[in-house]
Amino acid sequence: MSPTVLLIEDDKPLLGLLGLAIEGWGHRVLPAAGAEEATRAAAEEEQIDLMLVDVSVIERSEDDLLGLLRAAHPESSRVFMSGFRPPQAQPDEPFLLKPFSLDALEEAMRAALGG
């Protein structure tokens, strides 16, 4: 079974582009354009193997989005991305600075998924 990726990105064109690339690599993609969609997807899915998270969505969330996602899927790996800076709260987790290449994304995802 292919890995399931929760893709959280508020830039809808980028969400679509990244989703197409990730599906092309053989993964199942759960796209979320914001905190509400991400929370709903996490609640509805039994297994999420990787969360690809735009830091700005976490920072703008009124709730502790990252805490909710971690509680719902503690087994999930995470890769963070931002056009500004690495997240301070997750110093030990992978981070991609936008703009990044699809090769860099694929490499970060492969490493996070243990492959």
Image (cartoon, rainbow, N blue to C red):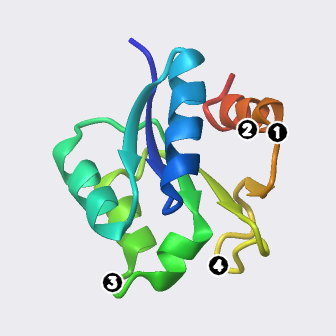
Image quarter (top left, top right, bottom left or bottom right) of the N terminus: top left
User: Residue at 60% of width from left, 69% of height from top?
Assistant: 55
Image quarter (top left, top right, bottom left or bottom right) of the C terminus: top right
Residue that numbered label 1 is attached to: 101
Label 3 is placed on what type of residue? Asp
Label 1 is placed on what type of residue? Ser
Q: Are marks 1 and 2 in contact (CB under 8 Å)?
A: yes
Q: Choose the circle earlier in sequence order: 3 or 2.
A: 3
Q: Are marks 1 and 4 in contact (CB under 8 Å)?
A: no
- x and y, in percent, of residue 69 in the image: 37, 61
Q: Residues within 10 Å of mark 2 (few under 14, many from 20)?
A: some
Rounded to the nearest angstrom, the CA distance separating label 1 from label 2 is: 6 Å
Rounded to the nearest angstrom, the CA distance separating label 1 from label 4 is: 24 Å
Q: Nearer the viewer, mark 4 or mark 2?
A: 2
Residue that numbered label 4 is attached to: 89
- x and y, in percent, of residue 7 in the image: 47, 46
Rounded to the nearest angstrom, the CA distance separating label 3 from label 1 is: 31 Å
Residue farthest to the bottom, as pictured? 62
Label 2 is placed on what type of residue? Leu
Residue that numbered label 2 is attached to: 105
- x and y, in percent, of residue 28 in the image: 41, 25
Say what secondary structure mark 4 lies in: loop
